[in-house]
Amino acid sequence: MNDGFVWFAIAFWLGGWAFNEWLVRQKFSNPALNRLAWFAVPVIFGAAIIIIWEGVVIAFNIPPILLPAPSDVWVRLINSLPILWADFRQTFLKAVLIGYAIGCGSGFLVAILIDRSPFLKNGLLPFGNFVSALPIVGIAPIMVMWFGFDWPSKAAVVVVATFFPMLVNTIQGLSASSSMERDLMRTYAATWSQTLIKLRLPAAWPFIFNALKINSTLALIGAIVAEFFGTPTVGMGFRISTEVGRANIDMVWAEIAVAALAGSAFYGVVALIQRVVTFWHPSVRSGRS
């Protein structure tokens, strides 16, 4: 065992921890410094984890087939950019984004349509909760049989996975406005569409964005899992299952890193849009204070 790497990793971890503890308690007069400190804390935390990981792998001489070092994963990632880009385009740009748009968009529109029908609303909500609980590994092979091996079958899995969370959250959000507020709109002789646009949808935005954020990660997981059941020779799920069989674990970790970055960036974009649209909500205003 190489003691030097272990002590270096422990020292880096403790130093990063102490610096983060100091950083989170600072209130800088310059807003730019506050934003920089807010950004630096997770970066230092992530860097400390990578250093610990690298140090443990080298110090204990862990075989790459069990756990490759981050430096090995980085080398494989840099040397495999064309393959990773092709997998990213097949899985994320085609299956995830198209399935996400269709699933969330149709869930939102159906929620608007059935909102005026208590029969449909009461009947569809339990069914939606039931379908949301169905395992993706059970739906994926059926969608592959129906829509073929290419990306449309993966997009179909994403549609099924994202439709009902959006439907349920939108219906709950449309019921968030109080009866007193609706009575006030009626006293103004507001039509159903005016009440929807000016009162009920603004009250529903926090619920709708919660569904969009949940679906942003659910869509990526669904597409990758669906590729395990049949796909052309490209895609994140195909690459992970194939490279595991070839014992190229560093390539598997490179695909996982790309998927994690894509999922985090997607979630972050949705969260930023939420802050712009729901700037009036107490949760957003308290975050800015």
Image: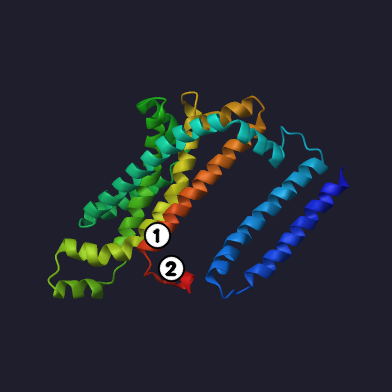
Identify the residue at horizontal 65%, vertical 53% (top origin): 46
Q: Position of residue 5 (x, y in %)?
A: 82, 47
Query: Could you tell me the amino acid type at mark 2?
Result: Val
Secondary structure, mark 1, is helix
Under circle 2, the secondary element is: helix
Q: Is residue 125 left or right of residue 60?
A: left
- Residue 135: x and y in percent read 46, 40
Badge 1 amino acid: Gln
Label 1 neighbourhood size at 10 Å, few (<14), some (14-19), many (20+)? Answer: some
Place of residue 162 in the rendered image (x, y in percent of width and height, measured from the top left): 39, 45
Disc 1 target residue: 274
Q: Which mark is residue 284?
A: 2
- The residue lying toward the viewer, choosing from 289 and 244, is 289
Where on the picture, by quarter, is residue 48?
Answer: bottom right
Question: Is residue 255 something that shows in the picture?
Answer: yes
Decide which of 166, 209 is in the foreground and name it.
209
Q: Position of residue 160 (x, y in %)?
A: 37, 41
Residue reaching furthest left?
A: 189
Q: Nearer the viewer, residue 62 or 30?
A: 30
Quadrant of res 79 = top right
The answer to whether mark 1 and mark 2 are in CB contact below 8 A is yes
Residue sitting at x 76%, y 60%:
14
Neighbourhood count class around disc 2 (C-alpha, 10 Å): few under 14, some 14–19, many 20 upward: some
Q: Is residue 204 left or right of residue 29?
A: left
